[in-house]
Image (cartoon, rainbow, N blue to C red):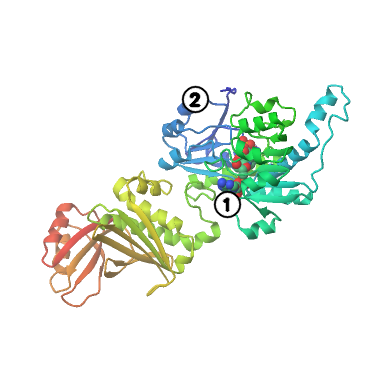
Amino acid sequence: MLKFSISCLSYLSGEIDMKVLVSDSLSNEGLEILKEHFDIDVCTGLCEDELVEKIKGYDALVIRSGTQVTQRIIEAADNLKIIGRAGVGVDNVDVDAATKKGIIVANAPEGNMISAAEHTIAMMMSMSRNIPQANASLKAREWKRNKFMGVEVKGKTLGVIGLGRIGSEVAKRAAGLEMNLMGYDPFISEKRAMELGVKLATVNEIAKEADYITVHTPLIKETRNILDDEQFALMKKGVRVLNCARGGIINEEALARALESGKVGGAAIDVFVEEPPFSSPLLNFDNVIVTPHLGASTQEAQVNVAIDIAKEVVSVLTGGSAKNAINIPSVKPEAMAVLAPYIRLSELMGKIAGQLVDSNYEKVEIAYNGEISGKDTRPLTVSALKGLLEMAVGSGVNYVNAPILAKSRKIAVVESKSESAEEYSSTVSIRLSSGESTKMVAGTVVGDEPKIVSIDDDKVDIFPAGRMIFAKHINKPNVIGPCCMVLGKNNINISGMQVGRSEVGGVTMMVLNVDTDVSDAILDEVRQVPGILNAKLVTL
Ligand SMILES: NC(=O)c1ccc[n+]([C@@H]2O[C@H](COP(=O)([O-])OP(=O)(O)OC[C@H]3O[C@@H](n4cnc5c(N)ncnc54)[C@H](O)[C@@H]3O)[C@@H](O)[C@H]2O)c1
Ligand SMILES: O=C(O)[C@H](O)COP(=O)(O)O
């Protein structure tokens, strides 16, 4: 692997005692934002071993596509909270390893999409008119006008694989060049395709019909080698292909074979399986034009992504949320006002359920009823799991790794939604179960405050906070008094009390807010009071 020269600069102007490592070049506009808050080290060209050493102690790592953030680097990070990618692709980050460690991976997906789309169009036009080759020839003092005969793009068919942010912008621009458009993207609707003037088709149909094919997907299992020998065999002779997305989406060896055979008439490639691609077979063909991963290399794009990612890092390190996290459900600011109290409620309910449950549980059912069921409840589910698992695993659980921890503990998580609600406009309930045994906690939001409204079958009315004793008891005289006496005698102040509703002689729940910790021995004394069926301390 090529080793770049290392360059390091430090800025110690941070007002918050946190450190950010920037390991690829980042525009000054982004650095300025980071410098206002944190100590910054900009250190580019580090190899894996050097980063494994360097990463210790940093709260954030900011990268572009140059840094490979491997499992080893993530494991060596002892304080890292966020990996911020100033750009789109995160295929250079071991996202699974980061998720397991509870590290947010966030990108800046919008700032460079126009530049990447414009680069694709520039590459298509350059390839069609042999501009790079003609430029090199004339500078070599040759005048060969016939050698560089080109083709028009007007009326030709462009196949766009991946119609997300960049693919759509490419399609819009190609429509302006009066090209016919075909596209494949399993996640876009017929309506959206129609808006873009794109005829939806399969990859193989595109291979058969298109004169130009451009790929704009992420590099994932499903898209690796999406254009391979099979697709090249179907293509028209002379087809031109482009990759300004990620190396590996088009199989480079298969493309080289198709160029060799004459099936492919030209290729325009900005990204490679290995970068720099000095041993790529593609560099040997005159009809392949290449750029060194320049899609996002414009002044505008670099300023945009640097500012976006710097703001994201500031938000996360100062206790806010990540707008573009890859490994945690993100909430749009406008939705946050409604969701925030429910996120708090879900986490508190998870903590309460996790402390009230008697045995290990195999299943967590989270039900959303009423108005809240119409919202994006993913952050609520994650919060409930975080609260729940903190009780079992400790403080290593966070919003990023809670779902993965539940999965690794073989806990099934089932969500359900219903628009119908009874007493409250919205309720959230968490039911933990293992075989026949279950524990259920339900809550709502009143004003902006989380409130617990039932525990199992008992209706309660609790604003959860601090330390609370949940005592199931028989509703009869001489139970509550002696219970309070036990706490008083042990110098434990009761700051609040709430007793559930039931007929005399029935079983109900009493919740006592207490100001200090309650030892197991004191709780045992409470449990000895005749009429008390069980008592548990919940600490929030
Ligand atoms: N060359 C550069 O410098 C440069 C700059 C920016 C982005 N990129 C790359 O461009 C690519 C696209 O970026 P974007 O911002 O448009 O991403 P995006 O997420 O907005 O769009 C990707 C699209 O691919 C689609 N997709 C997913 N799986 C697919 C499949 N199996 N088949 C077909 N389509 C599939 C998605 O539905 C989505 O619409 C990424 O690989 C990104 O890293 C490169
Ligand atoms: O995915 C991206 O955003 C592009 O590939 C840009 O990569 P770069 O930040 O290294 O230019």
Residue at the image point whose x is 19% and y is 52% from the top: 519
Residue 246, can we see it?
Answer: no
Where is residue 454 shown, x and y percent of the image? 30, 67
From what the image shows, is residue 13 above or below residue 505? above
Q: Is 247 positioned to the left or the right of 420 in the image?
A: right
From what the image shows, is residue 132 above or below residue 183? above
Residue 293, can we see it?
Answer: yes
First in residue order: circle 1 vs circle 2: 2
Where is residue 172 shown, x and y percent of the image? 72, 51
| Residue at disc 1, CB closer than 8 Å to ligand 1 | yes
Viewer-nearest residue: 531 or 190: 190
Q: Quadrant of ligand 1?
A: top right
Q: Secondary structure at mark 2?
A: helix
Q: To which residue does mark 2 refer? A: 50
Viewer-nearest residue: 41 or 442: 442
Where is residue 159 shown, x and y percent of the image? 69, 46
Q: Which mark is residue 186?
A: 1
Q: Secondary structure at mark 1?
A: loop
Residue at the image point whose x is 53% and y is 44% from the top: 106
Q: Amino acid at mark 2?
A: Glu
Q: Is 433 positioned to the left or the right of 20 in the image?
A: left
Q: Which quadrant would residue 144 be assigned to in this image?
A: top right
